[in-house]
């Protein structure tokens, strides 16, 4: 039963607030519990109060921090199919409250990145981009947003565009949609406003750490 409760609660609690400290140190936060009648509350109010209740649970609150370079690869469609390869700098944080009645495990990642892209159709179109994305997630699914500035050229013509993005994050793979605003576009035949894509990061060191920390949290949750 506790496993079922854990899975059902994971998504609503991924935006819980974790006490911040370096991963080599631990903070302790003890607070009292408050009774409240939720019978007539709206779902939005209940969600806010649940998040507050999770943050106020007694127990040992921990935050682990990791930083590292991460290769990234992807495919995107923006009128044409593009292939991407690049490198990101990841700033991960994993936090949870141990021995808590509520599920409180989650992680976040801030990732600036540089990538190169290429389109090979009836002609060769190449480019590069710089971007940043922020991910807030449970062990299974998360939400993310970000943006990037891109430059493409086929030699005689070029284009410069700014693309805000919204994403669904599945730990190793991100699905995203972006809408491009063109500063200059001499490649209208090859580039459009709407961009759909998938990107994958290769960070096995972080994945192993996340799994180990999640097992540590899960064992404390079952106590």
Image (tube, rainbow, N blue to C red):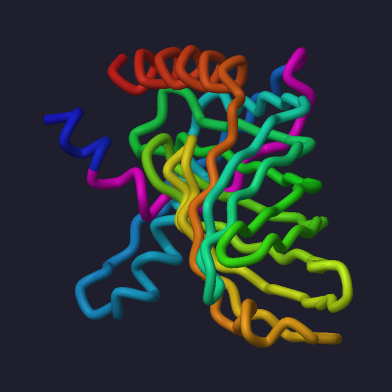
Question: Which residue lies at the image location 42% right of the left edge and 43% below the top edge?
Answer: 170
Q: Where is residue 19, by image quadrant?
A: top right
Read off the magenta span.
8-25
> Which of 135/194 is in front?
194
Q: Is residue 39 left or right of residue 59?
A: left
Q: Is residue 219 left or right of residue 3?
A: right
The spot of residue 129 in percent (x, y) is 80, 58
The spot of residue 165 in percent (x, y) is 61, 68
Examine the rendering and report whether any part of residue 143 can be seen. yes
In which quadrant will I find the N terminus? top left
Question: Which residue lies at the image location 76% right of the left edge and 49% below the top edge?
Answer: 116
The spot of residue 76 in percent (x, y) is 53, 60
Examine the rendering and report whether any part of residue 16 can be seen. no
> Quick one: which residue is furthest to the right in this view?
156
> Which of 76/144 is in front?
76
Q: Is residue 5 left or right of residue 137?
A: left
In which quadrant will I find the C terminus? top left
The spot of residue 166 in percent (x, y) is 55, 67
> Which of 113/142 is in front?
113
> Which of 125/27 is in front?
125
> Quick one: which residue is furthest to the left in this view?
1
Q: Is residue 100 magenta?
A: no
Question: Which residue lies at the image location 75% right of the left edge and 64% below the top edge?
Answer: 148
Q: Where is residue 48, by image quadrant?
A: bottom left
Q: Is residue 17 magenta?
A: yes
């Amino acid at each position: 039963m506790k496993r079922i409760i854990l899975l059902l609660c994971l998504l609503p609690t991924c935006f819980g607030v974790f006490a911040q400290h370096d991963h080599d140190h631990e903070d302790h936060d003890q607070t009292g519990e408050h009774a409240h009648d939720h019978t007539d509350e709206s779902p939005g109010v209940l969600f806010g109060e649940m998040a507050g209740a999770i943050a106020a649970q007694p127990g040992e609150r921990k935050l682990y921090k990791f930083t590292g370079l991460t290769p990234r690869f992807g495919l995107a469609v923006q009128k044409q199919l593009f292939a991407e390869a690049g490198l990101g700098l990841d700033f991960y944080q994993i936090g949870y409250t141990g021995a808590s009645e509520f599920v409180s495990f989650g992680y976040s990642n801030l990732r600036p990145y540089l990538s190169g892209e290429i389109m090979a159709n009836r002609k060769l179109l190449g480019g590069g981009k710089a971007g940043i994305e922020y991910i807030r997630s449970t062990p299974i699914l998360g939400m993310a947003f970000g943006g990037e500035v891109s430059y493409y050229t086929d030699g005689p013509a070029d284009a410069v565009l700014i693309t805000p993005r919204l994403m669904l994050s599945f730990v190793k793979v991100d699905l995203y949609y972006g809408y491009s605003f063109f500063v200059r576009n001499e490649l209208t035949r090859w580039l459009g406003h709407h961009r759909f894509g998938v990107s994958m990061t290769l960070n096995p060191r972080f994945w192993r750490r996340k799994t180990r920390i999640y097992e540590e949290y899960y064992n404390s949750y079952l106590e």
